Amino acid sequence: PSVKKRFVDSPPRRSIRFVDDLNLVMGTMGSQGAFFASDVQTEDEPEEDEDVEDVTAGLQLSATLKHIVRSQHRKNSRPNSTSRTQNSGSTLYYHRYESTLGQKEKDWTLVLPTGERATGVATGDHWSAVTTSRNLVRLFSGGGVQTGIHYLPGEVLTLVGRGRYCAIVHHDSGNSGGIGLMLVDVLQSKLLHAGPLTALTPATTLSWVGFSNEAAFCCLTSSGILSMLHQSGFGGWVFTPMLDTRGRIESTTVGGGSSTTHDGNYWPVTVTGGKCLCLPLPPGTEFPDAVKRPLVLGLPLRCPMAQSTINTSSSNPSANQTQTLEELSIRATISLHHSHFVNTAELKSNDTSEEEEVQREYHQLCAKVDKIGIKLFYEAVQAQRVERALDLVRGLHLEKSYGICLSVCEQARMMRLGEAIEGLREDKFRVEEDGDGTEEDSGYESQEPRRSIG
């Protein structure tokens, strides 16, 4: 048998094919290479071959001669059988796509200790990992250097990697008996998060796990809810439901741009650009067809929001717009915090002088998030909902955004609201009375409302 990998994204790469003489049973593909593992090969586990059995059964051969024929066949069909018999654990094989140092010896192979079976594999940028039947996770560098061996809290369900991050889903060996999650920065050898997989609610099972293109861990449960793990504004890690795939959802085809709907289940591929790229599954199926190349759909992310009971009639479309903006604000804030976390981790790891560029990008993202908050603030002022307006100001990030809200209050002649906002700004930015409050350009264009509030 052989293994073939065909690249369908850009930039294009040639297809890769290699002969599987290791009896590989699992594998994963990353941006730099593919990582595989075989089952345990035991010394007393003969390989049955129907063709050889048929031939030897039809000939009048002695038992000794039949044994010689079968042994010779096994030796020819498994050239590495000697090494695998001596080291009867699972065999690990890393196949690098390309190497700037030459194609010769770019791949590597290792064998686990006797009796140790691989239960899951993952790979990322300059690292690979395998979990084993002994509740171990073994870490390797891109070149095959063994960099770590660690015990896990419980039996592993699955693991996945992207970039510098690896997520391990496991059974909790403690009293809770639930499902746990570990998020690791492999390049920094740092445990970022360890705790229960709270997105897995009672009476649901785990259907899919993966990383978004922005390196955020995501999971899909049997209830059809796609959730994302991210850092909250308080510094901890939390799950947020990002999409409810149940029911009829309108989607767009990737590349074609046409609109379509689907009533069945979905199999996610990745999450990127505010969409979940996934494969529609026929009714009654749980997994996509591995042979066919199906059409990839893009489901727009939309957090399941609570519905307002005030001014929800069709005659007042602003109510629906407000809810849309609130949902967009939540996802934009999540993206802001996660992007800042990832960029900061890259900055610490690479030890470069790009700190100013990272800060500039963060300010630009803050400006985009604040634009949504300012729109919501403007609508709240129009509706005379003062407390709501003040709450929205508290969620702003930049001092310039506070100044825009103050201008809105002046136009609406809401002096008391303006005084409250000024107090919040002083508390947050400590603006001195004689200061001019200037701020570096953060990506804003004109934010002033073009019409006054009546």
Image (cartoon, helix red, strand yellow):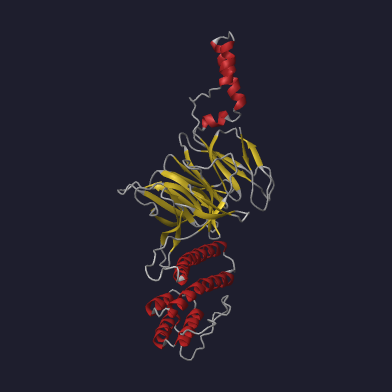
* 350, 61: nearer the viewer: 61
* Residue 257: quadrant of the picture: bottom right
Query: Residue 306's spot in the image, x, y percent?
Result: 39, 63
Q: Position of residue 107 (x, y in %)?
A: 62, 43
Taking the image as shown, residue 435 lies to the left or right of residue 173, namely right
Point out residue 366 in the picture as x, y percentages from the top left corner. 51, 72
Outermost residue toward the top in this view: 60
Where is residue 385? Give x, y as percent: 39, 78
Q: Is residue 146 above or below residue 443?
A: above
Residue 430 can be seen, yes or no: yes
The residue lying toward the viewer, choosing from 62 and 160, is: 160
Residue furthest to the bottom in view is 434
User: Relative to 21, does residue 318 appear above or below in the rendering?
Assistant: below
How many dots with numbers?
0
Determine the residue positioned at 39% across, 64% down: 307
Q: Quadrant of the N terminus?
A: top right
Q: Is residue 186 visible?
A: no
Residue projecting furthest to the front: 315
Residue drawn at (50%, 82%), measured in percent from left and top? 404
| Nearer-the-camera pick, 102 or 454 | 454
